[in-house]
């Protein structure tokens, strides 16, 4: 029994997300998936979101669990700051869309969308399946730039750090890529 436990632990360590996650500079796999924002369903398209600016894509194990709730609250509090820099936040889990309708309202506080990945297609594409085989996402966060490249990747089961780290990456990117100045409003001719 001890040998079996040792083999399972070794396999889990080798499948650790720190080894598997996509690296900065890699192309970000495109995806479309069912998502919910404020309890309203829509199709989230990475390609469309990147037209507006960087995307913070974070994976979390399961809605309404202690760590995932804390992380959702942290992202909700920071969403206005991300938005001011032109960034979109999207969370992805293996939860059903009906669960995410509730989670997007109560825990995400209507601030950002959460997406359903029941078939684990997005999780697999981003090497974010917990231990490489469990039916839930690892806690991994990415910042993807409008040129469809991974700028930053962070993986830790502790929900603390994901918001601060991705926010710092977006700020650094934004400093190197300033937003265009807004066009002045036209004044009516007399």
Image (tube, rainbow, N blue to C red):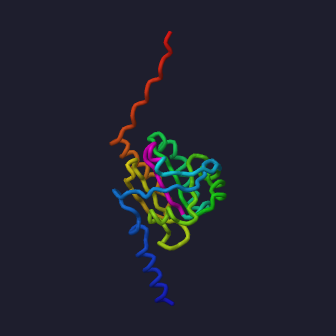
User: Does 166 appear in magenta?
Assistant: no
Q: Between 132 and 80, which is closer to the camera in this rendering? A: 132
Q: How many numbered circles are shown? A: 0
Q: Position of residue 161 (x, y in %)?
A: 45, 56
Residue drawn at 44 percent across, 66 percent down: 127
Q: Between 9 and 33, which is closer to the camera in this rendering? A: 33
Left or right for 61, reference 103:
left
Q: Which residues are magenta?
A: 49-60
Q: Position of residue 64 (x, y in %)?
A: 62, 60
Q: Between 95 and 60, which is closer to the camera in this rendering? A: 95
Residue drawn at 48 percent across, 17 percent down: 187
Q: Position of residue 153 (x, y in %)?
A: 40, 58
Left or right for 43, reference 147:
right
Residue drawn at 63 percent across, 61 percent down: 96
Residue drawn at 58 percent across, 57 percent down: 69
Q: Position of residue 113 (x, y in %)?
A: 56, 50
- Does 61 sit above or below residue 171? below
User: Does 55 appear in magenta?
Assistant: yes
């Amino acid at each position: 029994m001890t040998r079996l436990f040792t083999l399972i632990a070794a396999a889990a360590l080798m499948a650790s997300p720190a080894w598997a996650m996509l690296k900065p500079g890699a192309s970000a796999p495109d995806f479309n998936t069912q998502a919910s924002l404020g309890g309203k369903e829509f199709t989230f398209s990475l390609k469309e979101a990147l037209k507006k600016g960087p995307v913070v894509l974070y994976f979390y194990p399961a809605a309404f669990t202690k760590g995932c709730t804390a992380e959702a609250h942290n992202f909700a509090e920071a969403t206005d700051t991300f938005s001011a820099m032109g960034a979109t936040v999207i969370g992805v889990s293996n939860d059903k869309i009906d669960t995410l309708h509730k989670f997007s309202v109560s825990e995400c506080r209507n601030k950002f969308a959460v997406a359903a990945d029941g078939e684990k297609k997005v999780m697999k594409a981003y090497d974010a399946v917990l231990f490489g085989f469990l039916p839930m996402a690892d806690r991994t966060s990415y910042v993807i730039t409008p040129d469809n490249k991974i700028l930053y990747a962070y993986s830790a089961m502790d929900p603390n750090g994901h918001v601060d780290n991705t926010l710092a990456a977006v700020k650094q990117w934004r400093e190197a890529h300033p937003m265009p100045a807004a066009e002045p409003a036209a004044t009516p001719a007399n």
